[in-house]
Image: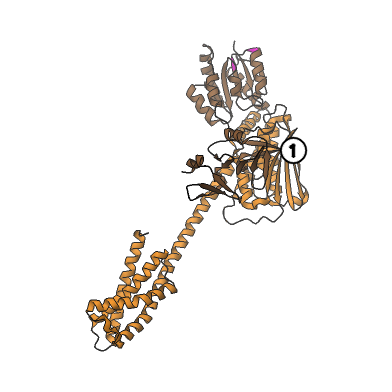
Amino acid sequence: MFTAIIADDEPLLRANLRKQLFQLWSELHIIGEATHGQEALQLIRETSPHIAFLDIQMPALSGLEVAAQVQCHVVFITAFDEYALQAFDKAAIDYLLKPVELQRLQQTIQRLKQRLLNPPVDLSMLINSLNNKKNYLQWIKVPQGEDIFLLSVDEIDYFQAGDKYTSLFTLNKEWVVRTPLKEFEEQLNPEYFWRIHRSTIVRVAAISKISRHFGGNLSLQLYHHAVILLVSRAYTYLFR
Amino acid sequence: MLNRHVLTYIGSTFLQVGSGNFVIALFLTLIIDKLPFFVSVVYSQSIGLSICSISILIGLRLNTYQTNFKIALISIIFGMPIGLFIARLILGQDIALIWQEEKTLSISLITTLIFAPLLSYLFYSRIVLLELKATLQEEKLQRMHQEKSLTETQLRLLQAQIEPHFLFNTLSNILSLIDSQPTQAAQMLQRLTQYLRVSLLQTRQLSSTLAEEIELIRNYLDIYQLRMGQRLTYQIKLPEELQQFHLPPLLLQPLVENAIKHGLEYKIEGGQIIIKIIQKNQKVIINITDTGIGIKTFQSSGFGLQNIRQRLQSLYGKSAQLIFKQHPQGTTVILELPCLPLSLPMTNPY
């Protein structure tokens, strides 16, 4: 007899899948349910089921992160994950779309029965490649007195390095942080943020005008700011 | 500078001036005794075409088709002597003798002074008409562009509004309730219908009220509450006098969605959302607090927030603010809007 677990943070959806599975494959024994990723991982490790039905979007750990760490046959469940689904199709990995249709579930069960004759495939490679998309800095924490403000990088027009601090300029304000400019340069998406000077990073979309001066020097003007930013010679290639 | 259009323009001007000159020549031959038609044609063509050439040259130099009074005057002053000179050259008459032929001089002068301004005016009005047509077409084109980008924004707003995860998860919840708990299924379906209806209406509006926005949010949060069970609670405080406060549509929902997505959905034990709206110092301040896990610095801020910022900036300039604050229990979003009546532009507000 085969065993399975179900992991989904929405109680109604867990119950429904259990009901549907019972309808189509009554011999399958559901030995446990998990309400989030961490719990799912623990449950799988403790009970070693043959099959794990894993929702992709879950608190604590995503279904993908759980699958990368376990050895069992996995069926992913998702409402909508374009990129993951493409990868699953390519690698012939089973998945169910929410709302789960009985017909589709029937097909999945047929395939599972075949698969159970062989040992489970190791999914960690595929999942790591899915998760491997480089993440760029999106939010910057700025402590001020007792508060910690969160600035979205989209609202910062330019970064200016000072002696010990870095100033971030938004539409209305100047914010000061201790993070060195170099660290920002490494973490920001280079498509949208350009280092133009030893002490300046600018958001490309904030540039309103580029002026060429006698001798080939460049300077930039920004929307909403009166400042004129100089471009070092080393960075003029960005504007060619 | 000399593209096909300019060349066509110059060609047609010369043709028309040329035919005008023939009419003048005919007129002069008829009223003046013993003036051979041939001589009259040479004179009128030389003078007319000289004036015309000068005005076109000035136009090209100034990069304009428009013949204004100054250009016409300069063209006449310089064009007439040059034309006289050319005419006498063609007819083989002694140029120096012109000062003795008072008749020729005065006829040329008078005809030029009568006809040149007349012809100039004719051209001027024709060009003004043409330019008017061009402007109208350009305006039409611009309007079409604006309409297109407005539709695009509406579509993107709507897409953000009916986020696929939200929609499909809600639908599967409804499906799983339908057999066992039909009353609850109906309740959730009603909420979803209401939410979609208000969203659709709002995307087409240029302005909305706080009451409408809050209704949308209530529907949205109710759906989440039915889905997440005990994991989500919420509170909304909207004072009576601010119910009819006008603001751009769908401004608050993305902020609440953000609070759920990045704050509560990933938190195992769930949490609370508190929305508090107050009026202070000519500003309406909207506080949205969640008790979630907080925003991670590498997590995407999404289309919703970016779009809100753009809209705030184009509608309120620097007088509106969107601030995110982190506190030990979670995150607070503070949206400050000026109390001024929202004067919406007729064109694309986004």
Q: Could one spot residue A105 in this view of the protein?
A: yes
Q: Per the image, is A48 magenta?
A: yes
Kindly state the secondary structure of the residue where label 1 is placed: strand
Q: Residue at x 61, y 13 (%)?
A: A49
Left/right placement of residue A120 relative to residue B267 reads left
Residue A74 rendering spot, x and y as whole percentages = 57, 19
Shade of chain B as shown in the rendered figure: orange
Residue at the far bottom in the pictured view = B33
Which chain does the numbered disc 1 sit on? Answer: A
Residue A194 drawn above or below residue B72: above
According to the image, label 1 marks what residue? A147
Residue at the far left in the pictured view = B92
Please state which of residues B257 and B212 is positioned toward the viewer in this rendering: B257
Residue A119 rendering spot, x and y as whole percentages = 53, 12
How crowded is the residue under tag 1: few (<14 C-alpha within 10 Å), some, or many (20+)?
few
Give the main secondary structure of the magenta stretch: loop
Residue A149 drawn above or below residue A29: below
Left/right placement of residue A26 relative to residue B75 reads right
Left/right placement of residue B121 relative to residue B285 reads left
Which chain is brown in the picture? A
Residue B169 rendering spot, x and y as whole percentages = 62, 32
Please state which of residues A128 and B344 is positioned toward the viewer in this rendering: A128
Q: Could one spot residue B186 in this view of the protein?
A: no
Residue A226 drawn above or below residue A158: below
**Colour scheme of the picture:** by chain
Q: Residue at x 66, y 42 (%)?
A: B253
Tally of numbered discs: 1
Please state which of residues B286 and A201 is positioned toward the viewer in this rendering: A201
The magenta stretch is A47-51
Residue A13 rendering spot, x and y as whole percentages = 64, 26
